[in-house]
Amino acid sequence: MADGFATSPCCSTRHLFLSLTLALCAICFLSPALLHAEIVSGTIQDPSGAVIAGARIEITGGDLTQPLVLSSDGLGNFISPDLKPGTYSLRITRDGFEPLVKTLDLRGAVELHLTLAIAQQQVTVSVPGRSMAFSNSDPVYRQLRGLGLGDTFRFDNYTLVWDVGTFHGMVNSAPYPIGRLK
């Protein structure tokens, strides 16, 4: 009794046991809250319900310092590793489909069923040749365009007679079959 307190070995052991028990209980009850992690999983499909394999899923937000990139498997499924609760953005892309962006407030495990719309095809056709601005400037075209039934058109030594259901030509006023004209 050097400092005025009596210590018994029994009290010291009981105190140590109680302290360890409280610490262990605190770890058991608090660790799930501290280590709590959620997953995002789902299936990606097209408008007909067919699964889309190889879709790229990019997850950003929450406590992520860089995007988390996943791919859908052969059955169109994906699953994220553990994520902390928070707000995340998912961007799903695949060639031939419109990109899909979904915002998610993650507070528990989430199972998503996402449908990608088929991309609208944009086709550009470039036709080399004469400009459309000059297509009606050809004098022969302009004369032929105005022909009506029963009218005739003369071009060099050839006369085109426009009749109901028949075409025939004349060279120097003599009938000449159009198919043999050279």
Image (cartoon, rainbow, N blue to C red):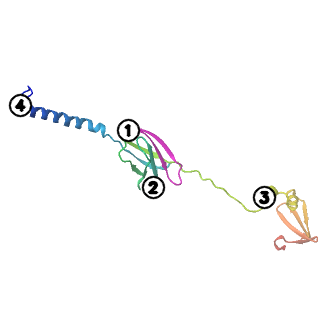
Out of 17 and 166, give the one closest to the viewer.
17
Judged left or right of residue 98, residue 20 is left
Q: Is residue 74 magenta?
A: no
Q: Position of residue 90 (x, y in %)?
A: 46, 44
In what element is the residue under mark 2? loop
Image: magenta residue range: 86-105
Residue drawn at the location 87% of the way across and 62% of the way down:
140
Amino acid type at mark 2: Gly
Q: CA distance from mark 1 to mark 4?
A: 49 Å
Q: Is residue 48 above or below residue 126?
A: above
Amino acid type at mark 3: Ser
Amino acid type at mark 1: Pro
Give the label on residue 54, or none.
Answer: 2
Q: CA distance from mark 2 to mark 4?
A: 70 Å
Q: Position of residue 84 (x, y in %)?
A: 36, 41
Out of 129 and 14, give the one closest to the viewer.
14
Q: CA distance from mark 1 to mark 2?
A: 27 Å
Which residue, given by chain and number where applicable, does mark 1 sit on? 85
Q: CA distance from mark 3 to mark 1?
A: 62 Å
Main SS, magenta region, reads strand
The reply to whether callout 2 and callout 4 are in contact (CB within 8 Å) is no
Judged left or right of residue 88, residue 8 is left
Judged left or right of residue 69, residue 23 is left
Residue drawn at the location 91% of the way across and 69% of the way down:
156
Q: Is residue 93 magenta?
A: yes
Which residue, given by chain and number where applicable, does mark 3 sit on? 131
Q: Is residue 94 above or below residue 8?
A: below
